Every structure is written in C-alpha cells, then in structure tokens.
Image (cartoon, grey):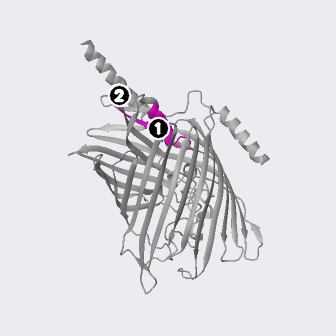
Amino acid sequence: MKLLAVLITLILSGCYALSNPQGAAQSVKMIDLKTQIYKATCNGAVEDWANCYDRAKQTCPNGYAQKERNQSPVGGKRELVFQCNK
Amino acid sequence: MNKKLGLAVAGALVAFASTANAGITIPAGDWTVDIGGNVNAYYTNVQTDNTDENGVTSSAAKANTIGTGLLPAAFGIGAKTRQNDLDIAFQFSFFTGTSSGDNLAGGVAAHGVGGGAAGNNTLNIRQAFLTFGDASWGTIKAGRDLGIFGSDAILSDMTLLGVGTGGPAGGSSTLGRIGSGYIYADWKGQMSYTSPNWNGFQFAAGVMENFTPAFTDGDHNKKDLAYEGKVTYDFAANDVTGRVWLGGISQKTNANYGYESYTSRGIDVGAKVAYQGFGLVGYYYDGEGLDSQNQVAQGLFNGNGTKSKDSGGYVQATFVVPGIGTKLGASYGLSNSKDGATNWGGNAFDIENESTIVGAYHPLTKSLNLVAEYTMQEVKNKAAGSTKTEKDTISLGAILFF
C-alpha cells in the first residue's frame, strides 16, 4: 500500500511537471454555420465521451440534438456531431 | 458590398477554424477524405511465475521488450460523400507493430539474431468496408470491421490504448482485458445494419463470416454464418453521461468427419457512467462455446472447438485529476471457461483468468498521451491440479493519435 502511495505521488508529480500550459483539451469544429452543426472530438486514452458531451453543452447555450456518434478503435477516435437548438 | 465582405470574412474564419481544429481532413471534389490512426510504443517488463500440478513454483526469466500495446499502430484512410440521397463511405485501416519483429519463428534463428530487418512486423488490414445509408433509415455496412458482440466492452476498456495483460509486447499486440474480462469482438467479414438514433436509443445487427475453431482447420466447415446484435442507449442528463448496452451472438460450428457440431451462444450487458471527471464501467457476459482459453490465445472467440461454459466481466473506475489532467484508473476482471473432455484435444479444463490493472494516462498534448500501467494476472486451470501462471507486467510508453 505504501509502495502504491509512493508510485501515485511520483506519477502525479511527473505529470504535473509535464502539464502543458497551453492545454491539452480537444476542440469543437463547426461543420455548418447556417444549420449550427458542430463536431466535437474526445480522442485518446485520457478523454472520453463525457468530454464530447461537455463541449456540446458549452457550445450550445440552448441545448443540442445529437446527430452522429462515431467511434473507431484505429486511433482511439471519438467524434460527436451535434446541432444547437435555436 | 460591406455585407458581402463580412460574409466572406466569416466564411473564411469558419473554414480556418475547421481546418485548424480537425484531424487530417482533405476535401477532394465531392468527397471528403479523412486520415486517422495512431502510433504507440511501450516498454514492458514481465515477470512470470509458473506453478505445476504438485504446487511447485518456478520463475521464468524476466522479459523486457519494446513494442505496441493492445492497439497496434495503425494508419486509416476513409472518405465519404452524398450521392442520390445516400451517404456513402469507405474505410481502409492498416495495422502493424512497433517492435523489432521476430525472425525466430519456427525455431530457426536467422543469423542467430531475434528481430532486425528480417523481423516479421507484417501489415494487417483489419478494416476494409463500405457503408451506405441515410439518417432517416439507418446505415448498412459490408466488409471487414470490428464485430458487434463485445465491441462496447473493448471500446470502454481503459487499457485499449495501453498494454494490460498479454505482455511482453512484441509482434503487433498485447491483450488488454481480452480473455480476462471480455471476449474479443475481433475483426470480421460482415454485412450489418445500424438503426437511426432515436433520442439516444440505437440498435445494430449483422451476419458475420463463421469463425471456425483455430486448431482444427479442415475438420469444421463454414456452412452457417454467425449472427450478432446489440442495443444501446446513450444519455447525457445534466452532468451525468453514459451508455448502457445489451448484446448477443449465435454461431453454429459444423463438424466434418463425424465430430460433434455445436452452437456457440452468448449475451453481454454493460454500463458506462461519467460524472465530473469520475468514470465507472461494469460489464458481464455469459454463454457457451465462446472462448479459447484452453487452446489458443485467451479471449479469442470459438477457438477450442467445444461447447465450453463461459462467463466473465470487469469493473473499472477512473478519475481525472483536476488541474493536472492525468487520468488515474483501476480495474478488475475475470473470465471463466470450462469443459469436460469433449473438446478437440480431449482434455478437461476449468480455467479462471483474473487480473487487476492500475494505470495513469497523461495528456502531454491533445494528440499525445503518456501511459504507465501495472498489471497483475493469474490464470488457473482448476481441472489440472493447482497449476497456475502468474504475470506481473510494468509498462511505460506513449501513444500519438491523429
């Protein structure tokens, strides 16, 4: 248990030192300005679908409708296509 | 004039934002080409202890290797367009390993050296499929892609982009939780249908090419196809998001030369929930004639050539440390597979494959993650005295996805 605590402390210290001040969060892409359709990505080992849904929520103050949810294991790819409510 | 200029500027900004935020997306006439994939490499240290039927334990030499984790390095290229009121698309994905390769196959050491330019890091094209459909009535897929049964289990596994069990790394893949928590969905020739999304509810069903037992080549035939399906429900209510799913598989294995034919059947159920940086996954499967623990690599579907009794599942908890962004995770999984002496080799087996995995996943940039994992695995065959194999695996590495 002590070893685990030491390992977690070391890992978090290392990760803190490697924290990127420019941020590592993935982005939202506008697909269609007229219809207010966007694509959020949450790829990789750290982010997950919750991050995509958070981005959709932040992008659309009046809520959104999910259009597509695409996942591929090829690169840990996750994409959420959504349309903002008017 | 000013209004037109304003619209042009707005359009240019949107176009710029699109290209700046996308992966690698290339407009090509009526088509949009999408290039994606990953490169990963892990150092793994594996300590193996074997206990024989008399309870005597011996340690194998430690193995230190560098290579890909559960997910091979991959380069995928696909494209989509819309023609005659149909969305049409294709995808090819090329997988390979990042180790030196192994030219010692068959016990013949080329120049007495393992690996090197003569190594066997071959190209494996796991995806080659087309799709067509429309948001109003769904999508049809034809070609080779990930199977349906068990797909959400592997896609929810935190070790998918790490190492998990099955080390040492080498060749093109470790096993993550395959066979120690779930059955491998695998890459199957298929024709499948995915429904439209009705407020989060969706289903997929398909016919797959029959997977015959791996070690009885020629003694079983492909008379029947396999059938797979699943229903899913995705929800995003306030700060709680997640998915629940229910799946099934059925495949008849037809034996030649008077051997026994049998039908593999399985069901699985799972749930994945996230709340403010916390994530939980719970998964369970049960069935007959599913797993290959006894004869070929753990977790591969129907390799034993017998109607074994199979069950298993895993639980997983993750937490993203605020400010630092590192995801910490822990999971426990178990797969059971047993059979009397009716399998192809005529040996009874009762295998319990369990593992505990802890991991740290750090986003160095939005496309590059650093990964550290520690895996403790124990595989017991209760039908063969107290024989067991224990493996402790430390893995450190990085994965870049694009």
Q: CA distance from mark 2 to mark 1?
A: 23 Å
* Residue type at the position of mark 2: Ala
Residue at image position (39%, 49%) is: B201
Which residue in the rendered view is the most extreme toward the bottom? B258
Instruction: Classify the position of the N terminus of chain B by image quarter.
Output: top left
Image: B64 above or below A48? below
Q: Give the x, y percent position of residue A6.
A: 76, 43
User: On the image, numbered disc 1 is attached to which residue?
Assistant: A53
Q: Give the x, y percent position of residue B320.
A: 61, 39
Which residue in the rendered view is the most extreme toward the left? B84
Foreground of the two, B249 or B13: B249
Q: Which residues are magenta?
A: A36-57
Specify whether residue A44 is in view: yes
Q: Give the x, y percent position of residue B348.
A: 60, 79
Q: Say left or right for B277 vs A68.
A: right
Foreground of the two, B102 or A83: A83
Specify whether residue B102 is in view: no
Which residue in the rendered view is the most extreme toward the top? B2
Question: Residue B354 — which label?
Answer: none
Question: Residue B15 — which label?
Answer: 2
Look at discs 2 and 1 and give the one toward the viewer.
Answer: 1
**What chain does mark 1 sit on?**
A
**What chain does mark 2 sit on?**
B
Foreground of the two, B25 or B83: B83
Residue at image position (67%, 69%) is: B380
Image: B276 above or below B201? above
Residue at image position (31%, 31%) is: A35
* Residue type at the position of mark 1: Tyr
- Establish whether labels 2 and 1 are both on one chain: no
Residue at image position (58%, 51%) is: B159
